[in-house]
Image: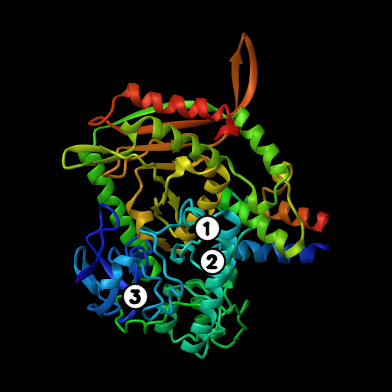
Amino acid sequence: MGEFRMPALGADMEQGKLIEWLVKPGDYVHRGDMVAVIDTDKADIDVESFEEGVVAELLVEVGTTVPVGGVLARITQTPAAGVAPTGRTAPVPASAPVPASAPAPATSGSVSPPVRRLAHSLGIDTGDLHGTGRNGAVTRADVEAAARAAAPASALEKPDADRGRSSPRARRVAGELGVDLAAVSGTGPQGAITETDVRRSASAVAGTSAVAEPAAVPEPPVTEPAAEPATAAPADRAESLRRAIGTLMTRSKREIPHYYLSTTLDLGAALAWMAEANATRPISARLVPAALLLKAAALAAKEVPEVNGFFTDETFRPSSAVHLGVAVALRRGGLVAPAIHDADTLPVEVLMDQLRDLVSRARTGRLQRAEMADPTITVTNLGDLGVESVFGVIYPPQVALVGLGRVLEQPFARNGLIGVRPAVTATLSADHRVSDGLRGGRFLARMEELLQKPEEL
Amino acid sequence: MNEQDARAAVRQAIGQVAPDVDLDEEAETARLRQDLELDSLDFLRLIETIAQATGVDTPERDYAQVGTVKGLIDYVAAHG
């Protein structure tokens, strides 16, 4: 008998609230299948199963707050579990029509950008798909099959299956305010209904507008939103997020002996290469400077293991993988720093695609457990907002934080001549228990070198 | 495209990318980055949304012309 427990979604998390079950008793789940949505201070987070088997019992009702480690469901292993069943032997959950067999949410590396875009447009979560391509890569056919499989299932399930997509939060708020989602016009991605849409609709009682884009998109079964009033409104979440950031940063400053380094990165070569590349690309495939900088940071972190890993129980454990945390400022205030997995191995175009996807989901408040739990080093990029340099506070249990400022034209001297070049100030905040300035300096120097050959990034 | 249609397309796109921005309270001289706080990814999504709605592509070399709401409206009107 396996147990599905409340996971720790970050060093600072003590409890979480179950806001949606994505499975029901009798469903067959593989390791990596998304099972539940947990509301934390930071976002609504999809959590996957670490067990394989049949969901025997859901122990916790939607709306319940459970401490980290608390048992949420029981999963019974079956004799068939060891022989990689395809899932056809068991009732297929309506929320995940195509079972995944990946050991972890395979959202990174195994989905090409065109397939990802297709999946996005069809409302299919590639993390839920079983890839049939090479090395388990999710193919276009997989996505299309999932879309086909999902449509009839959801049509059977719900009479109003033609309504637009909506986030769990939007559905919850709709439940509280008594708003009929079918009458709300969605302004989110692909016409998805956001919480803002719901609130706008609720305040504009009379005018009922049609759904902007009635997509026949599958939805997780809508569990009745909990009738309890304690649901976090945006203001509450902003407040609790601020508290959580405060707690974590206080701990960081108390426990981690930070040291800080700064250097100027010459971006002349990188931006010239990017401008040329972007000139022939459609907008959807264009790069931004941050993508090149993130890739350079990931590669440099791979080469300087003292900045990449976790410090726990008085011991530093370097990570062989580079899961690059990206600090994302939320428009309502606060920030989250979810990971781009294996960022050092991704072609810069794929990294760009994942960056856009990650930032968009971070801002709409929907992330996956592994994205929250896995960052091995974090980058914060405040350049867009005009800051020249940022000396950040390390996220425990990580041991380094990279800060990027604004890209500026700067004068420089070479061979006795003055010139102008685009440049950015990169900083490193690192943990003195693990590294010294020499290694930290090596990290920044490698970033600079890597950016001189952007075509190799 | 006339200015009215361009304005409608730009406002619609900003509403999608940054739903919290109340354009009625912002002057059209508002700068996309500094005043509306759009970052480079938001900006990319914004011109992508506009391109989908109007067919107006904004190449990177023209980014400097579309730094404000008004600049963007004028650009879409001129190229649409």
B73 sits left or right of B31 in the view: right
Work out whether residue A79 or residue A229 is closer to the camera in this orientation and state it: A79
- Which badge, 3 or 2, is on the more N-terminal residue? 3
Q: Position of residue A454 (x, y in %)?
A: 58, 32
Q: Amino acid at mark 2?
A: Asp
Q: Are marks 3 and 1 in contact (CB under 8 Å)?
A: no
Task: Identify the image quadrant of the C terminus of chain A.
Answer: top right
Q: Amino acid at mark 3?
A: Tyr
Q: Residue at x 40, y 52 (%)?
A: A338
Query: On the image, numbered disc 3 is attached to which residue?
Result: A28
Q: Chain of mark 3?
A: A
- Which badge, 2 or 1, is on the more N-terminal residue? 1
Residue A189 occupies which quadrant of the picture? bottom right
- Count residues near mark 1 (Cα–Cα under 10 Å), then give few for <14, some for 14-19, many for 20+: some
- Count residues near mark 2 (Cα–Cα under 10 Å), then give few for <14, some for 14-19, many for 20+: many
A32 sits left or right of A451 in the view: left
B48 sits left or right of A334 in the view: right
Residue B6 occupies which quadrant of the picture? bottom right
Give SS at disc 2: helix
- Which badge, 3 or 1, is on the more N-terminal residue? 3
Query: On the image, numbered disc 2 is attached to which residue?
Result: A142
Query: On the image, numbered disc 1 is attached to which residue?
Result: A133
Residue A192 occupies which quadrant of the picture? bottom right
Please tell me whether mark 3 or mark 1 is closer to you in this view. Answer: 1
Work out whether residue A67 or residue A118 is closer to the camera in this orientation and state it: A118
Q: Position of residue B71 (x, y in %)?
A: 73, 51
Give SS at disc 1: loop
Q: Are marks 2 and 1 in contact (CB under 8 Å)?
A: yes
Task: Identify the image quadrant of the N terminus of chain A.
Answer: bottom left
Q: Amino acid at mark 1?
A: Gly
- The residues tagged by marks 3 and 2 sit, at their Cα atoms, a distance apart of 19 Å
The reply to the same-chain question for discs 3 and 1 is yes
